[in-house]
Amino acid sequence: MCLGIPGKIIEIYDNNDLLMGKIDFSGVTREACLAYVPEAKVGDYTLVHVGFALNLISEQDAQETLDIIRQIVDVNAELSQEMD
Amino acid sequence: MKYLTEFRDPELAHAVLDEIHRTVTRPWVLMEICGGQTHSIMRYGLDQLLPDEIELVHGPGCPVCVTSLELIDKAQEIASQPGVIFTSYGDMLRVPGSSRDLFSVRASGGDIRVVYSPLDAIEIAQQNPEQQVVFFAIGFETTAPANAMSVIQAKALRLSNFSILVSHVRVPPAMYTILSSPHNRVQGFLAAGHVCTVMGYWEYPPIANKFGVPIVVTGFEPVDILRGILMTVNQLEETRTDVENGYPRLVTYEGNRQAQAVINEVFLECDRKWRGIGEIPNSGWCLRPEFSQFNALNRFSVDQIQTEESSICIAGQILQGLKKPPDCPAFGSQCTPEYPLGATMVSSEGACAAYYQYSGKNIPS
């Protein structure tokens, strides 16, 4: 139930006074409600759950997380070199 | 897909795993709250790759599993009535009630429709003004913003033929219940990343302080889950009990304030019965009195319900992290996803279904 799928916002519009958008999920396009991310812009990535965007995905934070983990990869490589 | 591929990268996953192996010195029991995380763990075989010292127990974060039997029986009763279109997320249809499931109600002529979003149920109500459309509003905090918005929309559109059967549950009171149990074994929590996307994690420091457990907000992809485990193990090894955020690309401390505001506009906290666990004070959300015209229980008379649980199923103990699916004598024999005795075998988030579907699989090396 709590699964969310990341997708890219490709269109934003109003429907019945609700902020809606078209979201591209790896080539599959579906509609989602954007009422909870009113700051959304076309091109932003968002997480969609039961037809609602729950938040925008922060590119910067995603990158920082990956950088932290890549540091572990680098340390691992150094350690295995020392072992050799 | 961006934000999926990187967090499924086997090289990164193995690096975090190596770091976990280097960090751990003692046995630790961690609980992942969310059934979606349980499925990721089983699907990628992460439990098999962790050091023997780390035991993962599976939490109650499966809304389909914890929706009370009484409410499922009431849903079937409402769905059986003529003139009703009963709408639900697909997972609920095979959940066993006392004597049948919603699929068998549909086979007997009930108009039951699976919807992807509660806004689909609103559309069905607009298209069928002569019929009563009921939406089965189950879910945790993740789903509450969507379900709340359906009520706001129904009011704005003046829909007199739309109502919801509410079964909302909240995570923090369940954590209190698990940690307060004399049988509790959980020493650290992986908090549910999408619940926290909505709610933030401001509710968790009092829990971490009171019970002395680290809590790490954790995502759903293999690298996210392993990182959540590493952060929790780091804290345990250093005897820290902080609340940390391992899913910052989606979660902030405050959460989504707009979503919380709409939840609070439509719902208020109430006691809630959890299937297999019992009643937990203030663990649910109910409709506020000003939205009572949208309460399906006020619109349909379904009070006389006698519930009866399977006598074999141990789903309640599994949902509290006290037992695991293979501990159940019926697992895989009398109880399978095709013929489930309990809801944990049905849902795409149920621990029994995850064990049944994935046991033995591994991440690519």
Image (cartoon, rainbow, N blue to C red):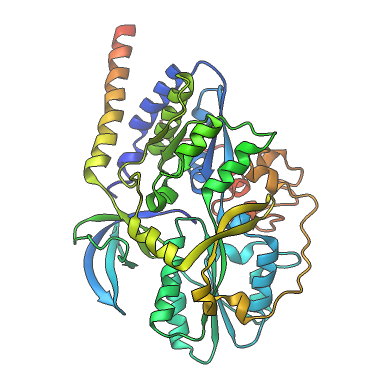
- Viewer-nearest residue: A45 or B169: B169
Q: Is residue B305 left or right of residue B34?
A: right
Side (left or right) of A20 relative to A42: right
Q: Residue at x 21, y 42 (%)?
A: A60
Looking at the rendered structure, the number of numbered marks drawn on it comes to 0
Up-down: is B17 above or below B225? above
- Specify the farthest residue to the left: A42
Q: Position of residue B170 (x, y in %)?
A: 53, 53
Can you say whether B260 is above or below A71 in the image?
below
Q: Position of residue A81 (x, y in %)?
A: 29, 11
Q: Give the answer, above or below, for where B65 lies relative to B180.
A: below
Q: Nearer the viewer, residue A31 or B165?
A: B165
Image position, residue A51 (x, y; %)? 38, 65
- Is B271 above or below relative to B88? above
Quarter of the image where one finds residue B165: bottom right
The residue located at (64%, 42%) in the rendering is B320
Where is the C terminus of chain B found, in terms of image quarters? top left
Q: Residue at left 27%, top 48%? A: B2
* Residue B45 seen in this snapshot: no
Residue B237 shown left or right of residue B351 in the figure: left
Q: Residue furthest bottom?
A: B130
